[in-house]
Image (cartoon, rainbow, N blue to C red):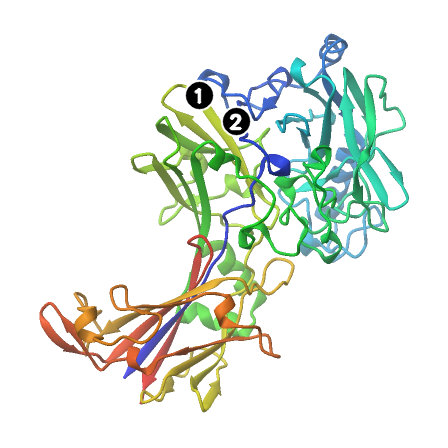
Amino acid sequence: MKLWLQLTFGMTFLLAALSLGGCPPTTGGFGDGFDDDIDMNDDMNDDDFDDEDDDDIDDDDMDDFGDGLAISGSVGAELAARRATQQNLDDSDDDTLDDTVDDTLDDTEDPFAGGDFDQFQVVAQSADTLNVYTTLTDEFGEFVLELPEDEEGSLFMITFLGFDSQSLGTVIFENDGDMGFTGLEVFGNVDLGSLDIPLTPGAGPVVPGDDADFTDGEIATDVFARLNEDGAPVGADSIGKGDDSQTDEPSDDERQRCDADRDGLIDLFDADDDGNGTVDDFDPNHTAVDPAMEDGVRLNFFMNLKIGEQDAAIFFQGDEDGIADLLMTKTVITFEVRAEESLTKEITGVRIIGPPAPSAPYLETATINNTTTLWSDEGFELDMAGENHFQQFVVPNAFINGGDTFTAEVTFDDGTTGVYNRMINYVFKSIPKLEQFGSPDAVTPITGPDPMLTFDGTKSLVLEWAPPVDEMGNLLVDLDYRFEVFFYDANNMQINGIDGEATWPTPPAKWDVNTTAFSISGPELATLSDDNTLTVDLPQEIFVDTVETTDGPVNVSAYKIDIASQNNGNNSALMLQFEKF
């Protein structure tokens, strides 16, 4: 009797609540010039939106800005350094960069590959109103981020993003030992001067230039971040997931509420808002408030990675190039937006938008699933899947990284538009690799999908696997598992119309006869073994030899098990073939 095993693990794409600091809804519009900087908290009409790039900021623009409320500055030197770095990579066959950058970074880890070196994104959040504002630098690296008059005197944290939507760091205005002051009260036009930005996050602080002018601003010495030995915020190099980012004492001070754990990351770019060591996706008590849910809108971005027997061999063999190709081409991202009961208006359209909103660079190469159509040709729109329900299935054709940020524009029937940002808190870099299988008293190591695997059908089936890891190599052990079993007849055809109650009149614990699935939570799987594996014991009673159907009894000759490691609907599948003896 043959059995196919499909291992599935969750790939959470439901991103941490954004609105930096766990704050209110981010809604707003995106224009084509610096006068249309994004206020991600004001409803806008559709006419306020277009897809053009920001106009260059010329000298007249800067002169006209003298009496306004704004944050300005320049990162031109950093743009030049990045362009030079990329040119060095393009011109060199060596595995390392030249002396202009860290010689430990090789070209396979090039942070600038495929990027637009003409623009940085500037993001500022008000700790007073919790509103978020953003703009782009021009081709010379200059920027002016205009703020509304009612933000005069507000306290801001300011962050810079690279071309890939990854945070390069929060501005450290001054430091006192291992504390860096991150808050700035703005009363007029504050010039940050020629800022210094590190080539890689965490390698150093983002600091204002010597030519900065804080005449119309005041540095808040009561708002600070913990710094590493290089003077950068402790969370900068790990999107808030590193050991140094953790704290037992998050702040409850409202002036610190955009970064309660003081790791130097506002919540939009912090995967662990409260610093308790648990990624927000798995932490029901994390401090951030979901701004979309506050508006009555549910965003659910998740992945499917389905690996068949032939491709499974690539993972078991450790073929790094092959695995990389599969992660890029077999991953399907689902972008889903639907209304909550609290929403008092209708959703009429949804799309994912790019700069000056944070956006991942692979949006330009992504294709709609099962087609060759570039998603960009469809305007990054989500299709209507039902009333107040929109979704799109997309293949990125590129690596997805923890820290990637997406921006969804949701249009309502009253003409207003909500804009909501979400960051990917973790990315799966491996499958839940089966290590051993068998009966409780005899398990057999597995080295790959071939030859065919057999097990003792008179005993329960034991499966032992290594859980998947994220982009930092962390084992993901907080996922729930669902084992769905499919039954096949002698002709290798799936048996449908199974009467679960008749087939299993006395079902084993955790076995749902209606869905033919065995479910178990992450905590119920207990702790990892010394070999960093998890184990499940599937009751023998599940694997019946005959099922009752609406057309009568049918003999079972094979099974397929879909083992789903889940978080918010995310899953990936590995197919393995078994034979029951």
The numbered mark at residue 158 is none
Disc 1 marks a residue whose amino acid type is Thr
Q: Which residue is mark 2?
A: 27
State the residue at coordinates (36%, 46%).
371
Q: Which residue is mark 1?
A: 416
Disc 2 marks a residue whose amino acid type is Thr
Tag 2 near tag 1, CB within 8 Å: yes
Residue 573 at x, y percent in the picture:
41, 64
Question: Which quadrant is home to the C terminus?
Answer: bottom left
Picture quarter containing residue 206?
top right
Relative to 371, is 276 on the left or the right?
A: right
Label 1 neighbour load within 10 Å: few <14, some 14-19, many 20+: some
Relative to 343, is 273 on the left or the right?
A: right
State the residue at coordinates (57%, 19%).
32
Q: Secondary structure at mark 2?
A: loop
Label 2 neighbour load within 10 Å: few <14, some 14-19, many 20+: many
Q: Secondary structure at mark 1?
A: loop
Residue 164 visible, this orientation:
no
Residue 397 at x, y percent in the picture:
49, 50
Relative to 82, is 287 on the left or the right?
A: left
Instruction: Give whichever of 11, 373 is nearer the camera.
Output: 11
Residue 205 at x, y percent in the picture:
81, 41
State the residue at coordinates (57%, 37%).
359
Classify 384 as above or below 126: below
Question: Which quadrant is home to the N terminus?
Answer: bottom left
Residue 540 at x, y percent in the picture:
32, 82
Count of all numbered marks drawn on residues in the image: 2
Q: CA distance from mark 2 to mark 1?
A: 9 Å
Relative to 520, is 400 on the left or the right?
A: right
Residue 368 visible, this orientation:
yes
* Furthest residue toward left: 551
